[in-house]
Amino acid sequence: MQAEKIKKLILFRLLFATVLLYCPAAFPDSPAFIFYAGAVAICVLSVAYLAWLIFGRRLAWLASVQVILDLLIETELIRHTSGPESPFIIFYVLSILSSAL
């Protein structure tokens, strides 16, 4: 059961990475590199998470690591897109809600 929830979280993360690829057009004042680097980081981490999930050990740690690394990526994204006025602040809420899974 816990593995299924983690799979859903990984898929949601990949959807978010796809959205990041389109963000440079919406935020021309922000460096495009941060969006692309964030998308690549999310994809690479998702592959690592899937490998961890296949081995099926310490899934509670996997969930914790995912949330912590998501918050770090989101923090960098927000820092480079207007700081506290960034529209990406909502992703903090989504990460916190996903950690409740």
Image (cartoon, rainbow, N blue to C red):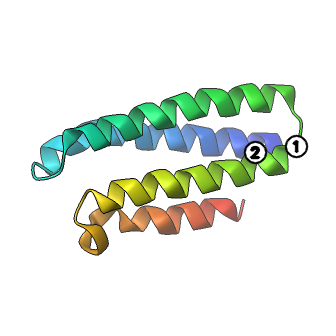
Where does the image place residue 5, in percent across and percent down from the top left? 73, 47
Q: Is residue 12 above or below residue 50?
A: below
Kindly identify which numbered label has been placed on residue 82: none
**Residue underneath mark 2:** 62
Please name the residue shown 49% across and 37% down the image.
42
Q: Is residue 52 above or below residue 60?
A: above
**Relative depth, front residue between 18 and 60:** 60
Q: Amino acid at mark 2?
A: Leu
Q: In the image, 47: left or right of 101?
A: left
Q: Amino acid at mark 1?
A: Arg
User: Which quadrant of the structure image shows residue 38?
Assistant: top left
Please name the residue shown 30% across and 43% down the image.
34
Where does the image place residue 33, in percent across and percent down from the top left? 25, 37
Kindly identify which numbered label has been placed on residue 58: 1
Please name the residue shown 17% across and 51% down the image.
30
Where does the image place residue 53, in percent across and percent down from the top left? 78, 32
Q: Is residue 87 above or below residue 17?
A: below
